[in-house]
Amino acid sequence: MIPAVLGYVLLGVAVFGRALFPPEGQMIFGDDIHRSYFFFREFFNQSVSHGVFPWWNPYMFGGEPFIANPIVNIWYVPTWIFSVLPLPAAYGWHLYLHVVWAMIGMYVLSRQVPDNKAQLTTSKYAYNTGAWISGAVFGLSGFFMARTYAGHADVIAAASWIPWVVWSFYRLGYATGPAYKKSFALAAIMLSLQLFAGYQTMAMMSVIVVGIVIAAVCIEQKRLQPVFSALAAGTTGIMLAAIQVLPVQEFFRMSIRTYGFPYTWHAYGSLEWRSFWQLLNPFIFGNVTTYAGPPPNFTEHSMFVGVVGLILAGTGAFSLFRSGKRQLQAVGIGIICVTVLGFWISLGPNAGVDLQYYLWKWIPMYKYLRIPPRHLILAVFGLSVLSGFGAAYFIRMLSRIRVVPFILAGLVAGEMVMFGRGFIELKPVPAARHDKEFIALLQADTEPYRVLQNYGAWLPQRDAMDFDSGLSYGVYSATGYDPSILRPYFEYVAHIAGESGEQAVLSHDIQIPYLTPEAAAGIDRLNIKYIQVPVAYDPFAGVARYRKIMESKTSEYRLYENTGVLPRFFLGSACGTVRVVSYRPNRIDLSVNNSCATTLESSEVWYPGWEAYIDGKKTSINKTDNVFRTLIVSPGNHTVIYRYNPKIFVIGAGISIGTVLVMLCFVFCGPLPGRMKRLTAHPVRK
């Protein structure tokens, strides 16, 4: 085990290289990291350094939950590295460690599959080398490496747990007697750790693989008990991760992802039959920057497992039918099914029989998934396992040639390292490309006003200040770059833009719709004081109420000041004043002086967990336009406090802690109940 792990550590170093110790002012490049994730981590670190745990994010989309955003996954211990190391180095290590973890997990799983000590004794080199090759192919595959360049840190972290989850549930399927309880706990813990890692679509992929593998185990053993054990362990794993899962689901249910998208939206980016040439030549349609193949991009269609790995996988599939070992054949056929299923779903409508469509029609989770090729992780997983079988087969056949294991491992390692290194690039930290004059102008305004970047989030004008970088600079934005946009807020913006939410979301699913001067009243209501537009598309030019205060010739943008903007907080009747005493992520203190009964209006987004207190007495929060927080205030001088107190985390933490206690009691407090003991004591057929 130790030599195998050391080998993976060295492979990772060979691939990531300088990204682990970047020069001053540089860091590993990943598009989403540089454009979004970096600012989330920086905001968290800044907040904690000032003694504030930022449950709420007031800097994007008029305000949204912060800790509940799956990008943050602060309960996942490996993310604490972002608070320990400088961020430019932390991202390189975070990606590196998860790639190595994926390789180790696949090694452990591949050695477990034979599940026969006699085989491991008589064919030690074959199975060990084959398992090692499986890990190298999986961790350095196109799925992981392309996503490193894309900056999909959460996808990589969650996907690295797939082999660990499958391994633990596979063990559970065969566990008997005293070992059963520990195997049960291990499976639940592994699934919970994957859920904590974020990007829960990868947990769904694990469930698919586990389902197929457990079905194979049931067929081989001719009993259904493994199914019940897997269901119970899976439920326990979800409950262990409740502090992560419940807030994320609450956020998700209030986001634009709940729209009923047409199937064409879900099927967008489906694999095409010509895409399979990428298994032989990953750059046949270009690399990550020059890609000209089937949409949407290189990353989503990346599935390379190496030419050597592919040959070994084919050999492995062939060898399974010649093994004569019932258990190995049953699980091996399951792995082949996983591989075929991954490719089949990824093809979407191009498959002839559109399996993706039936999943979308009948399984609720598929109502929220887009881009079928994200199922390529299933194909990559299956090919990686099969490559290990193939390597073991060659080594056994050529057992007299002692150097065969080293030759195969060397060929795979060399090919995959050369492939992976092509996705590792150092670039200046995000702040280096930002327009300091532009940011300084926005920061100089001490009142809580918002800026609107009124153009596509992919245009070069974003280099002046990335859409999410207000998190780092303390600049409030009316938009952002994130698929988790609260639906009521999005619908309000779409309405003032002259569209319905259903129409707008088809073209704007990571930012709010574009606004024009015709939406002046809504722009004022949203507290948008500054509007940045490209010079080439400037609907605000010549409109009197929008005063041009800055123009960049090099970056080709203009910045306007909206002279009619409403303050963040104001009274519904002109019978007094509102002053912001303190504005922090989780708490807002106001001083209100009014001579009549009226409403205290705001452009703050309503969300469960927000509480309001007038002169120390809790009061209910109403909604204006189904989105903005509003209070009713009586005449007089008042102290008003808004406080974000998300009880969903308390509920989630209670479930998580309670599940831990029950599971500890289950594992350590006495024998199994009689019925369960009889079921788990069933002999295993070899």
Image (cartoon, helix red, strand yellow):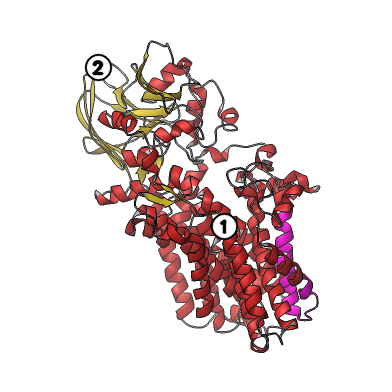
Along the line of sight, the residue nearer the viewer: 411 or 345: 411
Along the line of sight, the residue nearer the viewer: 81 or 325: 81
Mark closer to the chain start, 2 or 1: 1
x and y, in percent, of residue 213 in the image: 68, 68
Q: Is residue 192 visible?
A: no
Q: How many marks?
A: 2
Along the line of sight, the residue nearer the viewer: 232 or 371: 371
Q: Is residue 239 above or below residue 442?
A: below
- Residue 158's disc is none
**Mark 1 = which residue?**
144
| Placement of the C terminus among the 4 image quadrants | bottom right
x and y, in percent, of residue 84 in the image: 33, 59
Q: Is residue 656 visible?
A: yes
Amino acid type of disc 2?
Cys
Q: Residue at image x 69%, y 37%?
A: 264
Name the side, left or right, on which 18 lies relative to 85.
right
Amino acid type of disc 1?
Phe
Q: Main secondary structure of the magenta part?
A: helix
Q: Residue at image x 42%, y 70%?
A: 661
Instruction: Please tell me whether mark 2 sits on a helix, a strand or a loop.
Output: loop
Say whether residue 322 is magenta.
yes
x and y, in percent, of residue 25 in the image: 35, 49
Q: Which residues are magenta?
A: 318-343
**Mark 2 = which residue?**
575
